[in-house]
């Protein structure tokens, strides 16, 4: 299988994600330029973290207009796997591929630290290499990660079990203190109804090598690889 | 036209004016005078410091580029170099904390990528007045947000640094930003304009009226009217800087340009004249081609603007189209604004007229150097004799007070606002003795630290400066790295005051001595004088940024205790020293006494031993003893350890209890090791002539210190942890 990492002006985790997918997970990985119209036959599109277009407007609000995003949208509608990390998650929300929006963190500060997230569902293409209830230690780094959705939408999300990761403490308890950015229902990762698109605020690429202190993030990439290599190249 | 008042506005003396007239063979017009005023400012011209800086060692086998370029360059082997430098942005950060600090980050980043290196880490040395004053908190919040806002968006990790508090920074905070870059050795670029006929291209943001005379502002004392200088502070745009980085690295990587210089202090003036002077050439520039943000700007304003995120490139005519194509890809313009010419003159046109015509050598290289009068710094106010200093009744309470002192307390409130992990190289999180960055595709790692205890330098500038170097190197040794080079940011008061000049002279001597002992070259840095507001000078604050190298990152150690049962070893001698200590300041309210003595040779032996022991796999944790002495070092090792396990130590030392706990004798390191390896560790120390003694074990839920069997301190780890952890956030909660 082949990964593609979209490079927007202002992306800054693109190199990291390329490094981990290519050098650590050892899968063919290409950088996709936001002005192109060609997804180069990739099996999974990753929207990396960063500050696309400076995020001077709402985070991700301008990146959704990049030419390549029309292709990504069509790719997702056809069942292609799309992973949005941090700014990538924000862009997926702006694109309408995922419901809801991001507000500023509850204490109005940028937050960079290791957090714990609990796997809520291990049957998704992004978690099947993990186990329901497992606690992953993965860093966050964002200003706008306070997930918000209107009550009706939130109810719908929960009913359809779209919440893939929730902030928790080291023992897996979803406490208010563990929900560092104030997200509704402690949502750290969210999939679409069909299950082929995931947005998550924590950075799995920052927790994929022992030298960096955690390898828990590999579970996300291993799951994608498992899903796609087992099923072959169908979309 | 040019009278005394015009000269005063430009911070030039009548003598300097006469020299300018002699050098350029005519009376300068106002624009030309403006150029000299910024290029000959203290900030750009190092007028008062140059004669002293010559004492610093600048050579060594790894040095590829020493002082004089945008940044220093050291060979780290494997075909790679590190490019690094530290710069101050003190004055702008007081006037407008957020933008002042943000553009400080932006400026140092450009210094690094101008040389072809990708910035891989930022560290900051920050000094504020005490946080119980709301004004100081507001400056601190602004500065931290500014660093965070710029660095995070740009995508460089801010991996460490230091934050100190002292009333001397109430009206004059210090913001010193260090940046480290990594490049291939054969891809380093210099700020040189070579080859007559080559084109000069302007890239990046448009030129506006912001920041005019920023360099001159940084070269004068502040008074009450500084608020009016707010328009002098520039506004940063990290997004544009990120685009510039990618576009510049791409044209450099493809060999499309011959020279490059960023427009920092003194903007277009500095970059054009410096590049021409370094290449031994002249330059012709047409200001009408310079992209401008607003209409009606004069040549004076265009030339002296310090608008951010701008660069100047020199490229062969046949490569210009290819350069412009790369910049277009990143949505940036790259107009040709001039040409490199023979003759050594800068000739600048505006609306068809020549508005500047001066020799570049005079502007760049002939700024006068002053050996300003100095007087020896007054000896420190004596510390009271120990007999006269009351021993606190409750040493546990004193311990908690020292831990909660803002200078010692946990700084997570600050560094969690910085993205310290982007680029996936950060192997040790902020709070460790040194930042540690892996080098991708290699076993090696880079360690970096910033250090200066300015209370020591105030009490004794020479000893304080020696300690600053020694402690920074000790920080590196504590992760297992060997120091390879230094950059420094020398923050001092008004150099026209003989006592300030005396402090500067002594501090530079101390730095030079220590750098020679450790065999580390100074590859550049920055001098920030005039840190005086309303007549009050800051403590002399020579901040050291030291880079170290570690051969095998798997051997690196961190400060936190690893497991109960491990042996605790104290390396180094503890003396009856209490002068200049945090304990004396916090518990007794005294900033007095001589700072601890330092024997540089012994210090070096101790550090070599620690590095060797780490390399031999004998050590499980290492932490240096600094502010707060042994008690604080034990506590921090417990706080950083998994599970926050305590420790029990028993020392047989002829010291008073408070000195034993809080004395800051130098050259000391706290190590832990598996019990099975203790004998080998102590043997190695003895063989290397290093005093080291097993003092106890990791374990229990308290920090317990005994002297010859009698307990002098016992505090539960959790209680100590809360005092340390909650102190800084507590100040910021008061308001909300």
Image (spheres, helix red, strand yellow):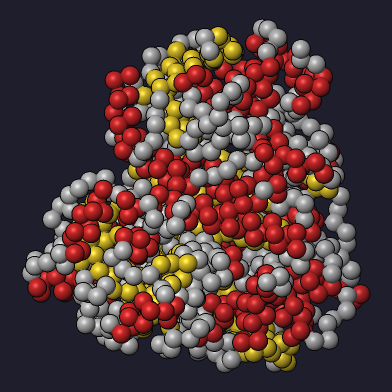
- Residue nearest the viewer, comparing B295 with B513: B295
Residue found at the very far front of the displayed protein: A152
Q: Residue at x 18, y 53 (%)?
A: A39
Q: Residue at x 57, y 79 (%)?
A: B639
Q: Position of residue A38 (x, y in %)?
A: 17, 49
Judge from the rendering whether residue B186 lies leftward or rightward of residue B654; answer left or right.
Answer: left
Report if residue B212 is visible in the image: yes
- Residue nearest the viewer, comparing A104 with B22: A104
Q: Which quarter of the image is occupied by the C terminus of chain B?
A: bottom right
Q: Position of residue A231 (x, y in %)?
A: 9, 73
Quadrant in which residue B273 is drawn: top right
Q: Residue at x 88, y 79 (%)?
A: B390
Judge from the rendering whether residue A233 lies leftward or rightward of residue B22; answer left or right.
Answer: left
- Height in image: B86 above or below B139? above
Residue found at the very far right of the displayed protein: B388
Report if residue B463 is visible in the image: no
């Amino acid at each position: 299988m082949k990964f593609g990492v979209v490079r927007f002006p202002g992306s800054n985790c693109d190199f990291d994600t390329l490094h981990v997918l290519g050098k650590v997970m050892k899968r063919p990985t290409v950088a996709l330029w936001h002005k192109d119209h060609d997804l180069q036959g990739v099996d999974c599109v990753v929207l990396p973290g960063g500050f696309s277009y400076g995020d001077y407007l709402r985070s991700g609000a301008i990146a959704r207009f990049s030419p390549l995003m029309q292709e990504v949208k069509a790719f997702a509608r056809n069942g292609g796997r799309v992973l949005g990390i941090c700014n990538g998650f924000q862009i997926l929300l702006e694109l309408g591929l995922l419901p809801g929006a991001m507000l500023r963190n509850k204490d109005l500060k940028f937050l960079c630290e290791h957090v714990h997230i609990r796997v809520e569902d291990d049957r998704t293409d992004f978690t099947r290499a993990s186990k329901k209830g497992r606690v992953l230690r993965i860093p966050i780094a964002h200003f706008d990660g306070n997930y918000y959705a209107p009550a009706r939408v939130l109810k719908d999300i929960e009913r359809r079990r779209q919440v893939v990761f929730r902030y928790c403490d080291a023992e897996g308890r979803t406490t208010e203190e563990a929900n560092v950015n104030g997200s509704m229902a402690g949502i750290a990762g969210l999939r679409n109804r069909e299950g082929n698109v995931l947005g998550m605020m924590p950075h799995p690429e920052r927790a994929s090598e022992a030298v960096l202190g955690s390898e828990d993030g590999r579970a996300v990439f291993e799951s994608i690889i498992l899903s796609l290599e087992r099923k072959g190249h169908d979309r | 036209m040019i009278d005394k008042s015009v000269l005063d506005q430009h911070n030039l003396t009548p003598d300097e004016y006469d020299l300018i007239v002699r050098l350029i063979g005519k009376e300068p017009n106002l624009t030309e005078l403006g150029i000299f005023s910024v290029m000959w400012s203290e900030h750009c011209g190092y007028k008062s410091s140059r004669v002293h800086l010559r004492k610093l060692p600048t050579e060594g086998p790894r040095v590829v580029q020493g002082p004089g370029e945008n940044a220093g360059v050291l060979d780290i082997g494997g075909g790679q170099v590190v490019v690094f430098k530290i710069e101050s942005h003190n004055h702008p950060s007081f006037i407008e904390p957020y933008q002042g600090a943000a553009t400080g980050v932006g400026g140092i980043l450009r210094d690094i990528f101008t040389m072809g290196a990708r910035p891989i880490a930022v560290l900051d040395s920050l000094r504020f007045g005490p946080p119980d004053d709301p004004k100081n908190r507001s400056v601190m919040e602004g500065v931290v947000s500014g660093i965070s806002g710029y660095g995070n968006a740009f995508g460089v990790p801010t991996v460490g640094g230091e934050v100190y508090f002292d009333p001397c920074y109430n009206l004059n905070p210090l913001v010193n930003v260090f940046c480290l870059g990594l490049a291939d050795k054969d891809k380093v670029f210099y700020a040189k304009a070579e080859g007559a006929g080559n084109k000069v291209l302007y890239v990046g943001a448009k030129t506006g009226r912001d920041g005019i005379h920023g360099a001159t502002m940084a070269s004068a004392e502040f008074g009450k009217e500084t608020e009016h200088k707010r328009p002098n502070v520039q506004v940063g745009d990290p997004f544009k800087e990120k685009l510039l980085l990618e576009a510049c690295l791409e044209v450099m990587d493809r060999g499309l340009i011959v020279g490059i210089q960023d427009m920092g202090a003194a903007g277009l003036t500095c970059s054009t004249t410096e590049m021409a002077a370094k290449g031994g050439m002249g330059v012709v520039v047409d200001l009408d081609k310079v992209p401008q943000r607003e209409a009606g700007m004069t040549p004076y304003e265009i030339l002296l603007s310090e608008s951010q995120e701008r660069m100047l490139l020199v490229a062969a005519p046949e490569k210009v189209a290819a350069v412009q194509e790369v910049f277009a890809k990143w949505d940036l313009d790259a107009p040709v604004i001039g040409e490199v010419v023979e003759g050594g003159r800068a000739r600048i046109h505006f609306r068809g007229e020549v508005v500047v015509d001066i020799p570049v050598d005079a502007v760049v290289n002939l700024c006068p150097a002053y050996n300003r009068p100095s007087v020896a710094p007054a000896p420190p106010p004596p510390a009271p004799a120990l007999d006269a200093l009351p021993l606190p009744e409750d040493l546990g309470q004193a311990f908690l007070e020292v831990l909660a002192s803002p200078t010692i307390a946990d700084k997570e409130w600050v560094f969690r606002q910085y993205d310290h992990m982007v680029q996936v190289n950060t192997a040790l999180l902020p709070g460790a003795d040194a930042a540690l960055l892996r080098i991708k595709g290699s076993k090696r790692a880079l360690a970096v630290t910033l250090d200066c205890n300015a209370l020591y330098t105030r009490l004794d500038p020479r000893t304080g400066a020696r300690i600053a170097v020694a402690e920074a190197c000790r920080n590196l040794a504590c992760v297992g790295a060997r120091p390879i080079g230094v950059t420094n940011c020398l923050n001092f008061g008004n150099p026209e005051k003989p006592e300030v000049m005396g402090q500067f002279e002594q501090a530079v001597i101390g730095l030079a001595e220590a750098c020679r002992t450790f065999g580390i070259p100074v590859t550049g840095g920055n001098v920030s004088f005039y840190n005086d507001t309303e007549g009050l000078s800051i403590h002399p604050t020579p901040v050291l940024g030291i880079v170290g190298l570690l051969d095998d990152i798997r051997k690196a150690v961190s400060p936190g205790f690893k497991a109960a049962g491990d042996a605790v070893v104290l390396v180094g001698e503890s003396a009856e020293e209490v002068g200049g200590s945090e304990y004396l300041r916090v518990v007794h309210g005294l900033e007095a006494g001589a700072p601890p003595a330092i024997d540089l040779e012994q210090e070096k032996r101790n550090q070599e031993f620690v590095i060797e022991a780490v390399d031999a796999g004998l050590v499980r944790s290492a932490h240096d003893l600094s502010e707060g002495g042994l008690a604080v070092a034990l506590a921090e090792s417990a706080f950083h350890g998994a599970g926050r396990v305590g420790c029990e130590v028993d020392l047989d030392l002829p010291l008073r209890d408070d000195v034993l706990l809080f004395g800051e004798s130098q050259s000391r390191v706290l190590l832990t090791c598996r019990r099975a390896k203790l004998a080998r560790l102590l043997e190695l120390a003895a063989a290397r002539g290093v005093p080291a003694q097993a003092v106890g074990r990791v374990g229990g839920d308290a920090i317990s210190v005994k002297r010859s069997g009698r307990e002098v301190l016992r505090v539960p780890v959790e209680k100590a942890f809360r005092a340390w952890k909650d102190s800084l956030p507590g100040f910021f909660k008061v308001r909300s």
